[in-house]
Amino acid sequence: MRIADRPFTIAVVLALVVSVLPTRIMGGVLGDVSSVMTALLNPPAHVLQVVREWLRPPHHARGPLDPVMRELLRERDTYRSQWHAARQEVVELERKLDQFGAIRRADPSGAWRLVDAAVGMSVPASSQGVVQLMTGTALGVAAGDVAMVRGDLLAGRVGPAPGRLTCTLVPIGHGGLGRIDASIVIDEAGKGRRLPVQLEAIGGQRLACDVPLDGGVLPGMLVRLRDSSWPKGAQGMVLGSVVEVVRKDQQPLRGRAIVLPAIDVGTLAEVTIKATGQDNDA
């Protein structure tokens, strides 16, 4: 055995001997040795504990009534609401850009301006369905201008004598618009075959027109405007869709198509007006 290995061997043998001796004999001796080792190790352990707490302070649980926690929660809710508001604003701006692009493609003349108008309550003492819009001639809105949603869906027309800050909207399906020349799109994706019809209001915000029973008109088909009495930029926009085709009793070969407007003005918060008048806002 090498001399260098003797201390290790002696320590192992001593540990084995101590481990088998009775506790009543070795208990006091081991207790004294343990106390000495604890005394030697406690000072550095205390210093290290202080350093650890300085580097990483202990976590103290704070309740919802703690002033610091209340302030943090308030800031969190504030920034969260601002984030949601900014996100909604981005979505709205993207919608308006898409709408502007669709209108520009349909009418590239540029002889118009888009005006967003909030939908107010029904106008007192007016025909059922007419609503008030919170815009007027100050922004170039003129009588007969068309109101739309999402760039291609007609909501109606501005009523006569608009005010400076308010005007009325006569919705699609209202009898005040009179008869409307339109086309039922028989084949939208293919040859684009369309059936000319004349729509008339029949109540309940619905319209109807006569169609041949063998003309291929089916529920779900789009109905687009083709009326020369309406502004040029509104031609081709969607008025609504066919919901039902019934046979006429007096004319067995003719049918009656029921059309539901694409937009229910009563559910809208805002429409976009394609204003054609002069901007009079000073």
Image (cartoon, helix red, strand yellow):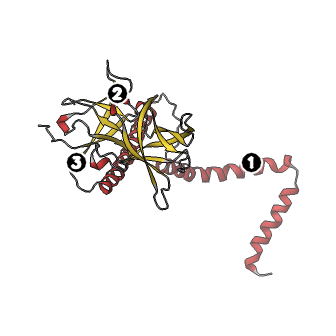
Q: Earlier in the sequence, mark 3 or mark 2?
A: 3
How far apart are labels 3 and 2 at the CA level?
A: 24 Å
Front disc: 2 or 1: 2
Front residue of 234 and 148: 234
Seen in the picture, residue 134 relative to 98 is either above or below; the reply is above
Residue type highlighted by circle 1: Gly
Q: Which mark is on residue 243?
A: none
Q: Which mark is on residue 130?
A: 2
Mark 2 Cα within 10 Å, few/some/many (few <14, many 20+)? many
* Residue that appears at 48% across and 56% down: 188
* Pointer 1 residue: 31
Mark 1 Cα within 10 Å, few/some/many (few <14, many 20+)? few
Query: Quarter of the image containing the C terminus?
Result: top left
Percent x, y of residue 271:
34, 38
Which residue, as the protein is rendered here, is positioned at the far bottom? 2
Q: How many numbered marks, from 0 up? A: 3
How far apart are labels 2 and 1 at the CA level?
A: 98 Å
Percent x, y of residue 131:
34, 28
Which corner quadrant of the image does residue 80 belong to?
top left
Residue type highlighted by circle 3: Trp
Residue type highlighted by circle 2: Val
Q: Earlier in the sequence, mark 1 or mark 3?
A: 1
Front residue of 149 and 43: 149
Front disc: 1 or 3: 3
Q: Is residue 172 left or right of residue 276?
A: right
Q: Are marks 2 and 1 in contact (CB under 8 Å)?
A: no
